[in-house]
Amino acid sequence: MERLGSKILELHKVGKSFGDKVILDGFTYNFQRKERLGIVGDNGTGKSTFLNLIHGKEEVDRGKVVTGETVVFGYYSQELIKVDEDKKVIDVIRDIAEFIPLEKGRQLSAAQFLEKFLFDRSMHYNFVHKLSGGEKRRLKLMTVLMSNPNFLILDEPTNGLDPEGIQEIRDLLRGLANNGTTVFVSSHPLSELEIISDYIVMLRKGEVVFAGKIEELLLAQQHVIITKGQNQADLEKLVSIATGLGHTATIRNNEVHVQASADFAATLNRAAFDAGITLAQLSPQVPNLEETFFEMTGDK
């Protein structure tokens, strides 16, 4: 894998629209070597367009994208692999290369590479049409990696994978980043992005509401207490109680989310009891990416 130079990828006041729909407006960001960056936003906010802008599949309307001379993109999309369905699994890999080069002169054979992606020897001579959707996604990711990219773009890389496959992808992405690859991931499950990524870009209707380190973002957030009563009617009452005690509270997924530290839980419990509400749940939560995204974007 060719090392990345000092300049990786720079976005300078980038703008992109489709008619009246703004995807990006004046966005600036400098990608770094070894960075694991995630992008999050609701459907239709432009995540896929963002990914396409980065590797040149879409043109920007305003601003500029500056790509380093040594950057080699690898792009993993959600589409299933396009290959002859009657081809054997190992031949899909061998058609690209018999051996996969690693650092310091090491290499993997096609068979060893397949095993690393959970294709045991008994599967190597299976036909592609016999693979499950998740297996085809793993095979596609292998073909992307065989181009030795040093800037890897992945759109929903764990979609359709079983828990073992998901863990393998997580470990792989960490290893690639540690060896110098820049990794940029789009994923709907925010819990997955929190595990995979160190940095995050949050999109909302053409606006970048945050771009930076996940750790710093979460440290700046208030803690949350999740609670609910035994009856549906208790939700609005709990919101009123928490609000009356000076805390912001919202209803989400039939639960009340109160922005408060764990110490407030006892006070909330007593106030609910005095109001005749028996709590079915009272759970202080450490700030996480999903909760933070909802609070910052105003989505519920």
Image (spheres, grey):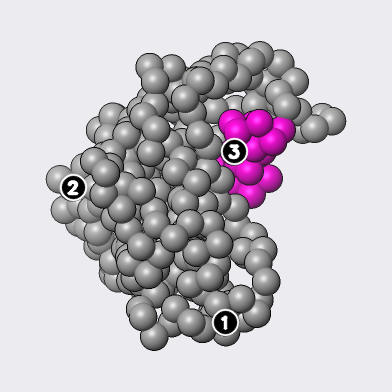
Question: Residue shown at 18%/47% (left/top)?
Answer: 262
The residues bearing labels 3 and 1 have C-alpha atoms spaced at a distance of: 32 Å
Question: Residue shown at 65%/80% (left/top)?
Answer: 86
Image height check: is 178 above or below 27?
A: below
Would you name the residue on which mark 1 appears?
Answer: 127
Q: Residues within 10 Å of mark 1 (few under 14, many from 20)?
A: some
Q: At label 1, which amino acid type do we have? A: Phe
Residue nearest the viewer, comparing 118 with 159: 118
The quadrant of the image that shows the N terminus is: top left
Would you name the residue on which mark 2 appears?
Answer: 262
Image height check: is 68 above or below 162?
A: above
Q: Quadrant of residue 33?
A: top left
The magenta region covers 37-58
From the viewer's perspective, is the residue at label 2 or at label 1 nearer?
Answer: 1
Would you name the residue on which mark 3 appears?
Answer: 51
Determine if residue 242 is in view.
Answer: no
Judged from the image, the secondary structure of the residue bearing numbered disc 2 is loop
User: What x and y, as percent, mark residue 41?
Assistant: 55, 43
The residues bearing labels 2 and 1 have C-alpha atoms spaced at a distance of: 55 Å
Residue nearest the viewer, comparing 240 with 213: 213
2 or 1: tag closer to the N-terminus? 1
Judged from the image, the secondary structure of the residue bearing numbered disc 3 is helix
User: What x and y, as percent, mark residue 198?
Assistant: 32, 37
User: What x and y, as percent, mark residue 113?
Assistant: 37, 63
